[in-house]
Amino acid sequence: MDAELPFRLELAGITKRFPGVVANDDVGFAVRPGEIHALLGENGAGKSTLVKMIYGILQPDAGTITWNGHPVVVPNPKAARKLGIGMVFQHFSLFEALTVLENIALGLDAKVPARELESRIRAIMQQYGLMLDPHRIVSTLSVGERQRIEIVRALLLEPQLLIMDEPTSVLTPQEVDQLFVVLRQLAQEGCSILYISHKLHEIKALCDTATILRGGKVVDTCDPKVETSRSMAEKMIGAGLKDIVKGKNRTFGAPRFSVKHLSLKSDAQFGVSLEDIGFEVRAGEIFGIAGVAGNGQNELLLALDGEVPVGRDAIVMDTTAVGELHPSERRKLGLCAVPEERHGHAAVSDFTLSDNTVLTARDRLRMVTGGLIKAGAAKTYTGEVITTFAVKALGPSATAGSLSGGNLQKYIMGREILQKPSVLVVSQPTWGVDAGAAAAIHQAIVDLAAQGSAVVVISQDLDELLALCDTLAVINSGRLSQKMVVGEVSIEEIGLLMGGVHGTAEETHIAPGAAHAVPA
Amino acid sequence: MQFRLEKRPQPSRLMLYAAPVLAVLLTMVAGAVLFSALGYNGIGAVLEIFTKPLTNPLKWQDLGVKAAPLIIIAVGLSIAYRANVWNIGAEGQYVAGALGGTAVALLTMKMQGPWILPVMILCGILAGMALAAIPAFLKTQLDVNEILTTLMLNYAVVQLLYFLLRTSWKDPMGFSFPKTPLFTASQSLPFLWPGTIMHWGVPTAIVVALVAWFVMSRSVFGFQVRVVGSAPNAARYGGFSAKRTVWLALLVSGGLAGLAGVLEAAGPFRQLVPAFPTGYGFTAIIVAFLGRLSPLGCVIAGLVLAISYVGGEVAQTTLGLPSAATGIFQGMLLFFLLAGDVFVRYRLKAVSTRPAGEAA
Amino acid sequence: MSIEFIVAIIVAIVLVATPILLAGLGELVVEKAGVLNLGVEGMMLIGAVTGFAVTATFGNPYLGVLAAALAGSAASMIFGFLTLSLSANQVATGLALTIFGGGFSALAGKAFLGRTVPAFTQLFPGELATHPIWRVIFGYSPIVYFSLFMCAAIAWFLKRTRSGLILRAVGENDLSAHSIGYSVLGVRYAAVAFGGAMAGIAGSMFSLVLTPIWAEGLTAGRGWIALALVVFAAWKPYRLLIGAYLFGAVMTLEVHAKAAGGFFSALPSELWAALPYLATIVVLVLISLRRSGLSGAPACLGKPFIPTA
């Protein structure tokens, strides 16, 4: 890094407003050539909006972008690429049914003959150790491989600035390490990297500088090597978060929810088949299922809540075999579930909250008589959920689509939890939810377990699981690992399992003393 | 300047009710322009079609008689479309209903009694359901798209009608015209008042709409239809079977189309003739949309479309417009309605800059 | 059966198959871009009446076909505006276009009822074009050769060109295409306009070559059969060609059966008339039995594109 050179990228006074919210408020920072610069912040802090403006997807309402010393306007992504800005999105913009080569060709502005493009791709792959078969259809690739396509696509343009938006959220720890090697090599060659994340340890390990955003404003620009994780976390989150309050010396009762030899062949084109899944959750226990996205989590949730019936004895609640029962029948027995996708799965966006209550609570709370719906009962219960879970909504007749993600999730969790289920299965309970709402949801889960319910939490957020759960297992390619006790298992071990190293019983037993995973 | 659609936080209730009214008005304006461009007296045609049926009391009964089958079919379609089941085979199911009722009528030519008409009606409903059961089976068991199957069956059923009229159902006293004998008094739908053409199908349509409205807004069945239609995954999560809903939606819409068919056969026609299929099954699609896929809305929309039918006939005789010209109005009405519908959920926002997805 | 008879059958099949091939090719491109336009029948009727009117007025069938293409395209733009710019429901809008097309063509065609139009001149020398055997290759209307050319051209375009790749990408994942910087709506408008032009030409084939007079609703549901064929062909142009000719065979069966005599000639004519439609249902069933998942269906088919960025 040479301080004499002009900044590669300099932002000043960048402001962007959306209806009802200021996403970026007077944001400014600078990135040097060859610097790995972190953009740190919670979900909703405005990181994505900011980089979309740098990449030309959005236009700032105010402020200036200076590129290598010259003020620029970036009207669209094509202009950004022309300047030398590359971007790897968090959600890949890939085309499942097309080949790697076709996908990369689509991302290039210049028309390159297929054969020449292929040799250039192979050269880049060689140079950075990003191995891929250019003729594979994308739908057959793993998530890590898909990310490599995006990176190769960005590198083909020989960028001077590479924006990485939450690149590790879908990777195993081992894949993260490989990615860091590539990024360091790039930085050494003079390419600046804008690295967006909310994972503190990654930023400490990788980045030279960190700009911290909170509520759309820059809180601080600092050196992550000097700062502690704790100090950065405080800046990122602001007011101290309430810790999850778990009762001390928690004891677990009899098994309430047992899954044995659950196998399910996926009939979807790109689905994952479940293979011989088994676990047992006791009364009062919170059991976590970790894993990288797309390893069978969705299929597992559908099997557990009854949306896809399985063999009768594969799922047992207390002593009742429920594997063949439909969701309504399972709910009557006390099994409630919250799927990952809020809009269109856990809730109907066009419907009022009251109607969304009827969707899952009509039987347990007797909202139906003689085939007719008791609208009053649904409204009353909805009001109760709104009050108890502090849901910000106009009332029971507000449509689900009008709520923010966090508030809708609070409503959905409340709707299920206040039905007092004996078993609760939730997937990604705090995905895209702000820190305050996440804390409230976590506390509600813990309280439910304290009343003797068995809880299953499926999440890709390992930190969440480590903080919340008593026990956990890892799902990979549709198989579930042995159950492990949180506090007795190392992150490295979980990482290996997430990466598909299927441990035997001996391997999964962790010697105490190694770097223990502890709640952050 | 470009414009962009921006999602409203809540669907606009105002636009929900204003869109159909606007659509009717815009259709009249655009219709006048189009007819003038084609060399007709555009304004005269629009006035003739849309006001004559209302200002001439002689036409009022006609409106009721034309609206009744439209309303009955559209109520069924509105339920199917809510469930996202695209039954566009109502025309065939309507003809099937008439065939079912006529089969009973031909068997009971020498009998009499008050039981004959109810049996005819029942068989008409069952025939409509039976025809709708084919796409229901194909959709639920084999995942065959119901749009194409329901549509193809329309053509097939009409050929069946022609075949029967040409062969075994032909009136032996009919001078070899392809038509059935006239129905007897026991087989015909009585008139509300003697001396009018208002038959019992008209109040039946109102009752059907009221019952459907109650069921759709208050019952678990109505809820199920709405959930399956707007969010199939949420419906499965809520414990509603998509397949069952497809069956119910097609059977209800097919049965109601069948009811309309048998009422029309036993009412205004009192026999079957090759000209029996008049496109009510297709027009009812527009009625269902104009009525906001709500049973009560279908009553109003059915009257509006009946006006265009009756008015179309008036214009045919007075202005020499071809009968299919009503199709123009109906198509345009649906266009404007669909365009207007967008503004229920979205509002238009002007943006001065070019959008991101601009590749030079 | 004499060879002349077989030639006559083949010529008949190719003629009736060509409109559904043309309309199907257009719709295939539209659907590859992720748009489901159910208004094929309406656009065909508009094309049919326009082609007939222009040919009857100016005496040049080529001009008529060109006008039919433009008219089909213009009609498709109504659909395009509603579904693309206003994100209206594609199924309902397609139905509206079909209803509108039926009414519009009936009204516009009223003045041309009973008129005749000059035929296309033969492309090939008379000895070949009317030769009892060689007419199987040389004896068709220019529109037939055009349809074959378009089949090959579209296959090449989709598979080999960058524009074809972009079109497929837009149909596969509109949000990604948008985020890379392609104009999703631009591509889709172009595809819809092309589909409209092809449907218009297909319609003009009815009024200029097959009948060749103008009659209300003369396309008789062939537009819907074209839609079914696209599914049957799994969105592949050459399979669409085969499918169209198979349907052409079904549609000409009655004539052959009557000529062959025996059992089939005794079947009622109504059954023969219903056969193409019943065959369509059978074909749809066969496809669903054969395929696992939706083979080849563009992932965004029928879904409105609303950019979130």
Image (spheres, coloured by chain):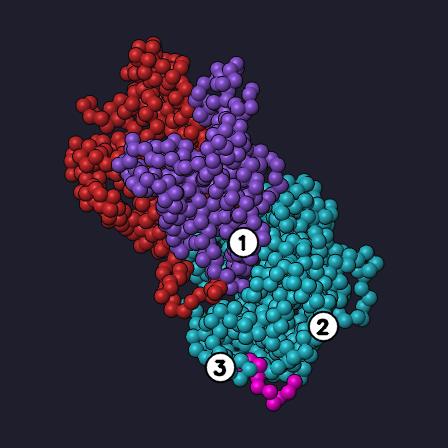
**The chain coloured cyan carries which letter?**
A
Q: Main secondary structure of the magenta part?
A: loop
**Residue drawn at (62%, 46%) of the image:** A268
Q: Residues within 10 Å of mark 2 (few under 14, many from 20)?
A: few
The chain identifier of the residue carrying mark 1 reads C
The residue pinned by badge 3 equals A71
The chain identifier of the residue carrying mark 2 reads A
The image position of residue C185, as x and y in percent, is 45, 57
Q: Which portion, as a residue range, is magenta?
A: A1-10
**The chain coloured red carries which letter?**
B
**Residue situated in front as seen by the camera: B256 or C112:** C112
The residue pinned by badge 2 equals A181
The image position of residue C93, as x and y in percent, is 39, 46
Q: Which mark is residue A428?
A: none
**The chain coloured purple carries which letter?**
C
Secondary structure beneath disc 3?
A: strand
Residue C121 appears in view:
yes
